[in-house]
Amino acid sequence: MKIAIIGISGQMGKWFASYFIQNNHEIKGYDINLKGLSELSENLNFEASDSLQKAIDNVDLILVAVSLEESSSTLLKLVKLVKAGVTIIDVSSIKSSVFITLKQLSEKNLNVVALHPLFGPGLPFNSVKKFALIPVSDSVQELKTINLLFPENETTLVSLEDHDKSMAYLLSLPYFANLSFASAMIDQDINSMKNLSGTTFAVQLTLAESIMHNPDLITSLTLVNPYSIEVLDKFKNKLDLLIKSAKTNKESLGTEISLIKDGLAQDLDFDQAYKKFYKMYMSLDQD
């Protein structure tokens, strides 16, 4: 299959390019970062294109892997450029801002797939790929496309609203929780404190530092998702309640902690959490 990857110089663009090349697909690539595009073409076997039009000419499939801010404008350009019969896959992690355009593309006799990879660019190619599929027009055909390209996959079908609401909890909230922790720590001598720290701090610090490799992603996930602010306000209110309880007395705080524990206990893996936590810590220690 001949595949064009738009945003090929990005982390996920590189992952998809490498994966498809390994699976014997012919790849064309375009990126607004022309320097990154040129450098990547020296290390990966694909045809670098210096324009969007050249990249999508005579291809069977177009995979859009640009940043969240660029997704909508890139797809709008494709509405004018793409010919009937081509498959378009958008892999952005938030779909509200692009879904109307994806619908427009599907009305042009195109197989349009709204796909969210539930993994990062460090995933080994031979691993099972987890995806969220947000049906655009024909979920059966869209799922068939995913199964063809990624035989080893676990794909969950989810509505647009449920997907983006879930991402506010699964992406925006964890990022902000770690950002809040980091913000409270940066006026401390972190290296000295690490000498006194135990397991919980070590894992939490690693999580907080790991998200800072891509600060723009934190901004995008917060601003592009229409449900993020509502969830973050909820986070703030819950934090205020816990602080108020801590200022009140031991019984008040204990009651809040018990309620939280009871809520988390609905997780089927709850009883294994402490064991998993120590596995995480031991892996950090080995590194």
Image (cartoon, rainbow, N blue to C red):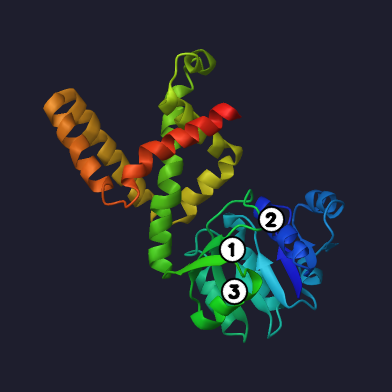
Inspect the image, locate mark 3, and give the three-letter code of the amino acid beneath it.
Asn
The reply to whether discs 2 and 1 touch (Cβ–Cβ < 8 Å) is no
Inspect the image, locate mark 2, and give the three-letter code of the amino acid beneath it.
Trp
Q: Secondary structure at mark 1?
A: loop
Q: Residues within 10 Å of mark 2 (few under 14, many from 20)?
A: some
In x, y percent, where is residue 285?
55, 27
In x, y percent, where is residue 27?
79, 67
- Residue drawn at x 37%, y 36% is 274
Q: Which residue is mark 2?
A: 15
Quarter of the figure that contains the N terminus: bottom right
Inspect the image, locate mark 1, and give the three-letter code of the amino acid beneath it.
Val
Q: Is residue 144 left or right of residue 201?
A: right
Q: Residues within 10 Å of mark 1 (few under 14, many from 20)?
A: many
Q: Which residue is mark 3?
A: 147
3 or 2: mark nearer the eye: 3
Q: Is residue 128 above or below residue 11?
A: below
Residue 135 visible to the viewer: yes
- Residue drawn at x 45%, y 14% is 196
Q: Nearer the viewer, residue 198 or 193?
A: 198
- Residue drawn at x 51%, y 12% is 192
Q: Secondary structure at mark 2?
A: helix
Residue 137 visible to the viewer: no
Q: Which residue is mark 1?
A: 91
In x, y percent, where is residue 167?
43, 55
Q: First in sequence, mark 3 or 2: give its number.
A: 2
Q: Residues within 10 Å of mark 3 (few under 14, many from 20)?
A: some
Q: Secondary structure at mark 3?
A: helix
Q: Is residue 97 above or below residue 139?
A: above
